[in-house]
Image: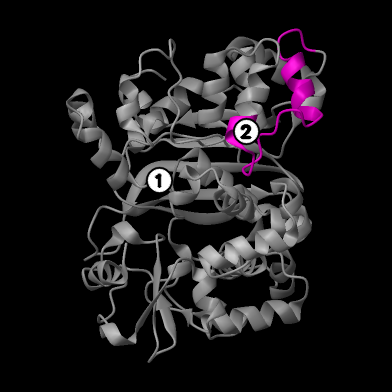
Amino acid sequence: MDEDTRYEAVAGRDARFDGVFFFAVETTGIYCRPSCPAVTPKRRNVRFFPTAAAAQAHGFRACRRCRPDAVPGSAEWNVRADVVGRAMRMIGDGVVDREGVPGLADRLGYSTRQVQRQLTAELGAGPIALARAQRAHTARILLQTTGLPVTRIAFAAGFASVRQFNDTVRQIYARTPSELRAEAGTGTPRTAAGAGIPLRLAHRGPYAARALFDLLAREALPGVEEVTGPPGVRTYRRTLRLPHGPATAAVEERRHAGRPGTPGPSGWLDARLHLTDLRDLTTAVQRLRRLFDLDADPYAVDGRLAADPRLAGAVAATPGLRSPGAADPEEYALRAVLGPEAAAAAVLAHREDAPAPGGGPARLFPAAGALRGHPLAGPLAAALADGTVRLDPGADRDETERALRAVPGVDARTAALIRMRALGDPDVWPAEPEADRAHEAWRPWRSYAAHHTGLV
């Protein structure tokens, strides 16, 4: 998109581009999402940025009306397999918060200087600034949805000090943390810590929630996952193994509409998280977003697939069909090899409990290291435990698929399904023989085509 096209999207308050780019107004010092309901600024006063972090780095603060920090992520990062795309997926998963920029660079196989240069050149912000913007968003969620002390929120959001936390919040939101918390009508009412953290998981465009919840219900692993309630108002619950401890999550099927007056049926899903350690909030949110494919661009996907007569009817019948990912990539890979019955038996055998406030699933799926000796999953479990196979968000997808195919017991279709779900690759065709190349016309959205055709 050139800048004139971006300005047209801003003038039209087009929600399709929320998260794809941001615009800032030099006369006000504020940056917004494209669908901001405020009066459209004059073209000469507008600047465009690829990320919220870039706008913040240039001194702009977040708009109070449209909350640009709460937009869905760009679908571009799920498509791209280069170092920038891989880095963005890992930053979203909290790698910089946990391991710093050296840890990010090491996972990517580049020097810290190379990573800094590539991200800054393309996104207008380096890894620290990108992680800082994410921390600020996490802090705002905790301030406005929980009654936790401000000091605890500062460290839970990933800040190194309370001073750094206060300075960042003031710079980005033009308010102190206390003022941000006291602000009325900006988020879900605050709840007691024991009630979990309520969230709104934003998405763009139409969202075929029923099809996705049907799939989750079919796949639900007893003790680890469950889907309850009648279609249309179902709730999906599951346990999560996170870096700082176990957690449980609940996501409701009912989709909420976006703000009145914005083009397109964008909106959100309600969710609630119970965390052992609040430092895992960012990671948990990103894993739910990947599982529910909330950063997808259904306009691009449906537009490409509907252009083919073979899929036009299916796309028209189910607009906004998602290609779900996995809440735990290693768990999905091991379950793909084990099958439903053996996976359920493994959960019972290892009996690793997780807190279950209010009932629901209370078991964690066994870690890879615990299944090294399993007759079916042993070879893959060993490869995951020793790092021969990497399934983290920044893994090179081609290298991972090659490594998977080298593991005994992992055939080509299973490797492709793991690439599709565990690595969130939107362009996988998990069928053989590969000699049939008719599906090439559906690139880069073959994963979605596979769901439309019933292949997965």
Write the residue at 71% across / 14% down: 377
C-alpha span from label 1 to label 2: 18 Å
- Left or right: where 276 falls relative to 373: left
Disc 1 or 2, which lies upstream in sequence? 1
Instruction: Say which residue appears at 63% left-offset and 15% top-offset.
Output: 337
Q: Which of 319 and 27 is in front in this view?
A: 27
Q: Where is residue 159 in the image (x, y as percent from the top left)?
A: 72, 69
Q: Is residue 155 left or right of residue 15?
A: right
**Residue 38 x, y percent position in the rendering:** 29, 79
Q: Note whether residue 134 is visible.
A: no
Along the line of sight, the residue nearer the viewer: 196 or 38 = 38
Amino acid found under the numbered disc labelled 1? Ala
Residue 246's quadrant in the figure? top right
Q: In this view, does 154 lie to the left or right of 79?
A: right
Disc 2 target residue: 329
Helix, strand or loop status at disc 1: loop
Residue 297: x and y in percent read: 35, 47
Q: How crowded is mark 2: few (under 14 residues within 10 Å), some or many (20 or more)?
A: many
Let me know if residue 375 is in the magenta part: yes
| SS under mark 2 | helix
Quarter of the image containing the C terminus?
Answer: top left
Query: Is 258 placed above or below 30 here?
Result: above
Residue count near mark 1 (Cα–Cα under 10 Å), binned few <14, some 14–19, many ≥20: many
Q: Name the residue under label 1.
A: 296
Q: Give the range drawn in magenta.
A: 374-399
Q: Do the residues labelled 1 and 2 touch (CB within 8 Å)?
A: no
- Which residue is rendered at x = 41% and y = 35% of the image? 234
Q: Residue furthest bottom?
A: 27
x, y (%) of residue 90? 63, 50
Q: What residue type is labelled 2?
A: Pro
Can you say which quadrant of the picture contains the N terminus? bottom left
> In which quadrant of the rendered view does residue 163 lie?
bottom right
